[in-house]
Image (spheres, rainbow, N blue to C red):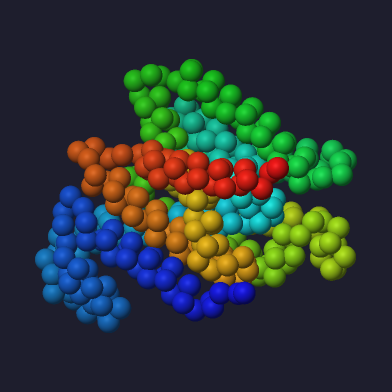
């Protein structure tokens, strides 16, 4: 029995709105909800807001870019995880299954090692993620096997391990007083350094990749079947798999380039979205995007307010994701026998 689309998406949307409001209100410089709404309404109406200039500056210049980036990164990772779990027909798959995160990590630590600028580091991370997945797909496609999906996953694991060794080597060679702390902080995930100029390079790839996945939504439903059945229904599995992997990798690489390595969102949120909206990708992808954005907004708000120093996002998402993963592993294991 299919679930009604509107109530589930409305709940996910309200969760995102709640995350947005909390992210704007809570912080080292508290801002009332009335002031936030007045500043936003004034911006939309083209008038001056009836708030102190410091409040408006915090909302648009300090907190605003970070809030928008958190929503985009969370949505991107959740959408990528949803796409990969459906493509590989495996509930334990996450966006870094094909080495996108490892490739982006290697690109970023190389940029830090050579003392490049922030934009260059982000560009290297983005390109590194794309190159890693392209290499995985090229190697996996060259291997003739009955199960190309399994070969692709195994290739991704091997390439990811190799790239992880590269990251370890660069960290070993890095300056332990200047470069190594920056590498470690980036690898744990953070939105502390997000500036307004970072939003467009993040928004473009995330929007493009998500729109591609939405356009392929009904074909993704068919791809949940075995390849033989999908081809019997007239779906070109090879080309479609490339398109899905490319779109999911695009949003993953853009997210990692902006925020570093943030785990668990792409694993946990798709399951919550599936419980809420059902397995149909027409509803599942929007629900995952809304829930992922709201979830990372809440995590980021906790990261910057929960302690005297900022807590890396990867640590907090792991604290939430690990119990869920254990429960999921226990549930899936019952079907293995």
Is residue 141 shown left or right of residue 15?
right
Taking the view exactly as shown, the residue that stands out farthest to the left is: 52
Residue 335 on image: x %, y %: 66, 48
Q: Residue at x 74, y 55 (%)?
A: 241
In the rendered image, the vertical position of residue 189 relative to residue 113, given as above or below = below
Is residue 243 shown left or right of residue 269?
right
Q: Quadrant of residue 147?
A: top right
Quadrant for the N terminus, please.
bottom right
Q: Quadrant of residue 205?
A: bottom right
Is residue 320 shown left or right of residue 93?
left
**Total numbered labels placed on residues in the image:** 0
Q: Residue at x 49, y 79 (%)?
A: 6
Q: Residue at x 45, y 61 (%)?
A: 291
Q: Residue at x 40, y 56 (%)?
A: 295
Residue 320 on image: x %, y %: 40, 45
Is residue 26 shown left or right of residue 19?
left
Residue 146 on image: x %, y %: 87, 44
Residue 76 in sight in this render: no
Residue 274 on image: x %, y %: 55, 62
Q: Quadrant of residue 284?
A: bottom right
Residue 269 in sight in this render: yes
Quadrant for the C terminus, please.
top right
Q: Nearer the viewer, residue 107 or 267?
A: 267
């Amino acid at each position: 029995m299919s679930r009604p689309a509107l109530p589930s998406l409305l709940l996910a949307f309200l969760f995102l709105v709640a995350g947005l409001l909390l992210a704007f209100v809570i912080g080292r410089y508290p801002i009332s909800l009335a002031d936030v709404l007045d500043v936003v309404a004034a911006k939309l109406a083209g008038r001056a807001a009836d708030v102190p200039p410091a409040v408006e500056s915090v909302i648009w210049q300090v907190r605003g870019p970070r809030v928008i980036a958190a929503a985009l990164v969370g949505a991107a990772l959740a959408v990528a995880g949803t796409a990969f779990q459906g493509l590989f027909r495996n509930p334990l798959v996450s966006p870094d299954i094909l080495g996108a995160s490892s490739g982006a990590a290697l690109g970023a630590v190389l940029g830090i090692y050579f003392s490049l600028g922030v934009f260059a580091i982000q560009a290297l991370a983005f390109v590194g993620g794309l190159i890693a997945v392209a290499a995985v797909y090229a190697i996996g496609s060259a291997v003739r096997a009955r199960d190309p999906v399994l070969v692709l996953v195994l290739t991704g694991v091997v390439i990811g391990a190799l790239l992880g060794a590269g990251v370890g080597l660069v960290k070993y060679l890095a300056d332990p007083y200047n470069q190594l702390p920056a590498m470690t902080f980036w690898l744990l995930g953070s939105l502390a350094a997000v500036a307004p100029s970072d939003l467009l390079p993040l928004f473009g790839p995330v929007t493009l990749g998500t729109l591609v996945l939405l356009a392929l939504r009904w074909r993704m439903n068919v791809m949940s079947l075995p390849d033989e059945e999908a081809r019997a229904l007239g779906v070109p599995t090879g080309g479609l798999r490339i398109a899905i992997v490319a779109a999911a990798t695009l949003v993953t690489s853009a997210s990692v380039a902006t925020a570093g390595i943030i785990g668990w969102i792409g694993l946990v949120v798709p399951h919550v979205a599936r419980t809420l909206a059902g397995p149909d990708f027409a509803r599942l992808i929007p629900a995952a995007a809304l829930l992922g954005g709201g979830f990372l907004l809440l995590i980021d708000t906790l990261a910057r307010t929960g302690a005297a120093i900022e807590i890396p996002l990867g640590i907090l998402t792991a604290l939430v994701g690990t119990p869920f993963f254990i429960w999921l592993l226990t549930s899936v294991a019952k079907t293995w026998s």
